[in-house]
Amino acid sequence: MPILEVKNIHKTFDSDEVLKGISFSMEKGEIVSVLGSSGSGKTTLLRCINFLETADKGTISVDGEVIFDAAEKKRPSHAEIRRRQLNFGLVFQQFNLFPQYTALQNITLAPKLLAKDSGSGSAEEIEKKARELLESVGLGDRMNHYPFELSGGQQQRVSIARALALKPKVLFFDEPTSALDPELTGEILKVIKALAAEHVTMVIVTHEIEFARNVSDRIIFMDGGIVLEDGAPDDVILRPKNARTKEFLSKMLN
């Protein structure tokens, strides 16, 4: 059974149809990279899956449970949407850290609020896990630093640890290195590779073609709001079937 199944997702803004029937599925532990030029619909797709936008058509299922159905007449409550969002973790292009909180506090904030609402998990356990996550992304010595005291790469690593803190079933990355200098990009790619080695289920929207080829189980190429290619990394990157895919890769790799 797929851990994530997306079927026929459509999304229109005003008269601009950004997503025109996107479908894909993935298994637990699988890593799927999504490639495509700016405006192809990649970020909108991630936002729809994560309930930051509401798709006009289609369904989204996790572990066989339909968590979104655009045809559903009764809209879920904010509390129910939040519950469904907990299936996913999202690392944004921009770091989106709270400037008034330390790295450690940024990570513990959401788990503590969730524990307060559900009555499960102690503050001590949450902080212990947050410290372990910061250690795992190489920031054990930066736990009490505020965002302005951290480099861009360090802030993004805090963002990754924050997304992992709620134990999502699928972790999404939206161009995680686009806001970084090339010198810092390697820091984030190294962390993602380490997560891949731990079989964390991930969807990575990226412009890092060679990285996507090396770390992914599958690559999806989107253009104009549709999926043009979906296959093994070497097949899509080295032997693309679609002329648009060939044109995109030619420009990116040269």
Image (cartoon, rainbow, N blue to C red):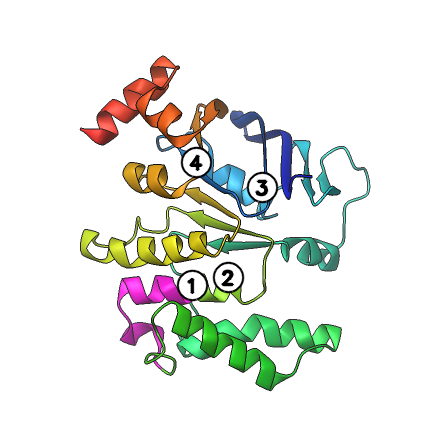
Q: CA distance from mark 2 to mark 4?
A: 19 Å
Horizontal side of residue 181 vs 218, given as left or right:
left
Amino acid at dot 2: Ala
Label 3 vs label 1, nearer the camera: 1
Between 160 and 54, the residue placed more toward the observer is 160
Q: Quadrant of the C terminus?
A: top left
The circle drawn on residue 206 is none
Report the span colored magenta: 145-159
Residue that mark 3 sits on: 48
Disc 4 and disc 1 in contact, CB within 8 angstroms: no
Which SS class for mark 1?
helix
Q: CA distance from mark 3 to mark 4?
A: 15 Å
Residue that mark 2 sits on: 163
Q: CA distance from mark 3 to mark 1?
A: 20 Å
| Crowding near the residue tagged with mark 4, few <14, some 14–19, many ≥20 C-alpha atoms within 10 Å | many
Residue at (76%, 49%) from the top-left corner? 76
Amino acid at dot 3: Cys
